[in-house]
Image: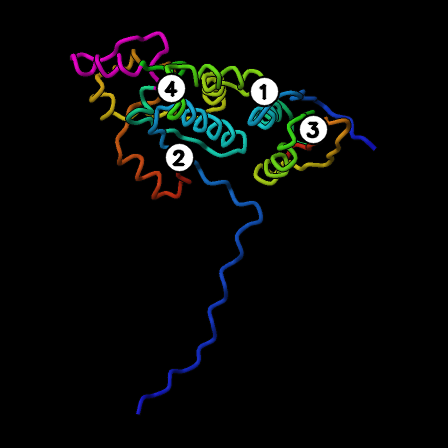
């Protein structure tokens, strides 16, 4: 016969979380380079900062090419890297749409509509994001793979980092957005 | 009764996310307890300002609409 467990009084519940919890930091993983996704990333980055959250944007793969200076035409050291930049011109003002690009007709219409409806452009939002303290972290591996140098990139980016930095931020509880 | 504002942000005609972004930038220049007034025409801003107020703790003390122009009055935390 088993001995019945003694009844213990339950532990008091932990104190309720304070009414105004500090907002979670936000980590946007900016992976895509299309116009509409760049736009979304910039809108969410500026809004996150406006809502009082610390916002970091990790720039990787096609998302990193967006943050090359607009006036840079060909980037990289070897022929393949140069071809990559020739096929997809880097820079935030040279993004293409994932659908309905039609040799630039889609983006042109999109920009025209944005102007008409007073929607800030990705470039304008980027400037605001930087002004509001959004931190941009380029991916070191993508920099190497595309042959991008610090002087190819826009001003104000942070030091290049790797995936471990991203994972550590996620483990610390950053709200992730993969765009 | 309308509350007198220490600063007014005219976000009329601006689309998402600019009314909120301009508000956040303006509120930084104010001292605690000062009052900010924002004028906007973006219908989405009604929910957005409620969310912004909740997230940032800056109290939304007044909210009116007049001829398609929304007026939000907030007191800095």
Question: Which of the two discs, 2 and 4, sits closer to the camera?
Answer: 4
Q: State the separation of the CA atoms marked 3 and 2.
A: 32 Å
Mark 3 vs 1: CB contact within 8 A: no
Q: How many marks?
A: 4
Judge whether residue B24 is colored magenta: no
Q: Earlier in the sequence, mark 1 or mark 4?
A: 4
Badge number at residue B34: 3
User: In the structure shown, which secondary structural element does the residue marked by tag 1 occupy?
Assistant: loop
Instruction: Check disc 2 and report the residue beneath it.
Output: A27
At horizontal 60% and vertical 40% (from top left) the residue drawn is B54
Q: State the separation of the CA atoms marked 4 and 3.
A: 44 Å
Q: State the separation of the CA atoms marked 3 and 1.
A: 32 Å
Quadrant that contains the N terminus of chain A: bottom left
Mark 2 vs 1: CB contact within 8 A: no
> On screen, A53 above or below A119?
below
Q: Earlier in the sequence, mark 2 or mark 1?
A: 2
Question: Which of the two discs, 3 and 1, sits closer to the camera?
Answer: 1
> On screen, A16 above or below A44?
below
Instruction: Check disc 4 and report the residue beneath it.
Output: A96
Same chain assignment for discs 4 and 3: no
At horizontal 30% and vertical 8% (from top left) the residue drawn is A73
């Amino acid at each position: 016969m088993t001995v019945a467990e003694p009844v213990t009084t339950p532990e008091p519940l932990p104190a309720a979380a304070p009414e105004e919890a500090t907002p979670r930091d936000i980590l946007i993983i900016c992976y895509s380079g299309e116009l509409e996704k760049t736009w979304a990333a910039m809108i969410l980055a500026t809004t996150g900062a406006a809502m009082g959250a610390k916002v970091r944007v990790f720039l990787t793969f096609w998302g990193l090419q967006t943050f090359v200076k607009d006036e840079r035409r060909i980037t990289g050291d070897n022929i393949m890297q140069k071809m990559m930049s020739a096929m997809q011109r880097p820079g935030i003002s040279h993004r293409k749409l994932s659908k309905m690009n039609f040799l630039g007709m889609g983006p042109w219409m999109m920009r025209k509509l944005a102007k008409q409806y007073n929607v800030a452009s990705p470039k304008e939002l980027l400037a605001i994001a930087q002004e509001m303290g959004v931190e941009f972290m380029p991916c070191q591996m993508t920099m190497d793979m595309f042959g991008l140098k610090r002087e190819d990139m826009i001003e104000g980016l942070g030091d290049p980092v790797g995936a471990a930095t991203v994972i550590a931020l996620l483990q610390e509880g950053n709200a992730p957005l993969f765009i | 009764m309308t509350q007198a504002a220490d600063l007014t942000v005219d976000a009329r005609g601006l689309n998402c996310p600019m009314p909120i972004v301009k508000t956040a930038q303006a509120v930084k220049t104010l001292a605690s307890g000062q009052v900010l007034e924002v004028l906007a025409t973006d219908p989405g801003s009604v929910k957005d300002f409620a969310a912004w107020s909740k997230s940032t703790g800056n109290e939304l003390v007044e909210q009116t609409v007049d001829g398609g122009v929304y007026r939000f009055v907030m007191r800095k935390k």
